[in-house]
Amino acid sequence: MQMNRDMNILVVDDFSTMRRIVKNLLKELGFHKFDEADDGATAWPMVQTGKYDFIVSDWNMPDMTGLDLLKHVRADANLQNTPFLLITAEAKRSQILEAAQAGVDGYIVKPFTAATLNAKIHKIFERVAERENAK
Amino acid sequence: MTCSTQIDIEVVQALLTALQEDNQEQAVELLDNLTQLRESELYQRLSGLTNNLHDTLDELVDNQLLLQTKHDIPDVAERLEYVLSSTEEGCAKTLASTEKAMDLSESIGELIQGSLNDEKQKLIQDLLSELNTELTNILLAQSFQDLTGQVLNRVALTISSLEQSLIQLISESRHDYDAIPDRTESEQKSAEMKGIGPNVTQKSKQDSIDSQSDVDDLLGELGI
């Protein structure tokens, strides 16, 4: 899966301000197809439709955390390869290790810059491309 | 609790008589006696309540209230401080960028003076004017910080006074505030997996990663 500016992106965050910021930054990077969810629990049925090529999620949300959403995605045979980026204020070493173990592709701590987001997305899709080529 | 102090009807009658006879001196003395009686009754009632409180808190040594007083209230107060300072900082950044954008818009207006035909010049001036209206709206929107700041300051004061009252309550119930235990590791771990938000308190900064580059290093070690 090459980085494709037409890909469908799901932005999950319980704060609408943050969803707007992330969407605007992604727009600046040339992406234009987004959907939003305000919680992991709202996002999960959307993800299950198989529509999304990339998920950008917060961690700390009321009903289902971003970490649990990631675990759900990785446990589903049809969705397990979906690139997953966590953008979160959670910055304990133990939390980052837990996210890595759960299979996160990228981890950005808030507050973050447009350059960081750009760099992480490129890195994620380079690695996805490498994985695809290796098959 | 029964009350051992009772108001004597004879004292009240004597007070009435003293008043009818306009004997102010005696009336004041009798009234003082009655008041003292009431105060001592009030004292007994309060002391009873305090004893009840001692017993209740003694029965609940592991009470959440003790843990909350020692750990959660100071944590909340520190987080509130963070909210105040970070919203202020955020507003200051927004104001600085907006002001800079207004200067840029003014410079563009000056640059196009006389360099374009009238129609284009008017078009651009109109757009710049609209842009300035939007920028002014951004400036005005930042006034929320003043209002929310005032509200948060009041909340911070209330929390601080509540904390002091609870600490006093704990010490009056013969508990050693310093001996209240820490939160258990499993409680902490379970909270972390749910997400605890930014690490803004001295305590939560322990074991937290400071910057994106440290996160990258840690993930790099894991091949991510």
Image (cartoon, coloured by chain):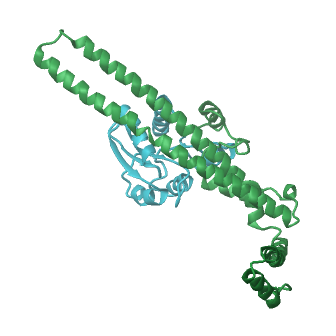
* Horizontal side, residue B108 vs residue A90: left or right: left
Residue A18, horizontal then vertical, whole percent:
45, 44
Residue A125, horizontal then vertical, whole percent:
46, 36
Outermost residue, bottom direction? B9
Locate the C terminus of chain B by quadrant.
top right
- Residue sitting at 82 percent across and 90 percent down? B10
* Horizontal side, residue B198 vs residue A6: left or right: right
- Residue sitting at 88 percent across and 60 percent down? B176
- Colour of chain A, in one word, is cyan
Eyeballing the image, is B122 above or below A135? above
Is residue B59 visible to us here? no
Residue in the foreground of this view, choosing between A36 and A106? A36
- The image shows a total of numbered marks equal to 0
Is residue A131 visible to us here? yes
Outermost residue, front direction? B21
Residue A30, horizontal then vertical, whole percent:
34, 33
Residue A62, horizontal then vertical, whole percent:
53, 58
Eyeballing the image, is B59 above or below B69? below
* Horizontal side, residue A5 vs residue A18: left or right: left
Locate the N terminus of chain B by quadrant.
bottom right
Eyeballing the image, is A59 above or below B165? above
Residue in the foreground of this view, choosing between B121 and B210? B121
* Horizontal side, residue A115 vs residue B7: left or right: left
Q: Which chain is green?
A: B
For residue B81, which quarter of the picture? Answer: top right
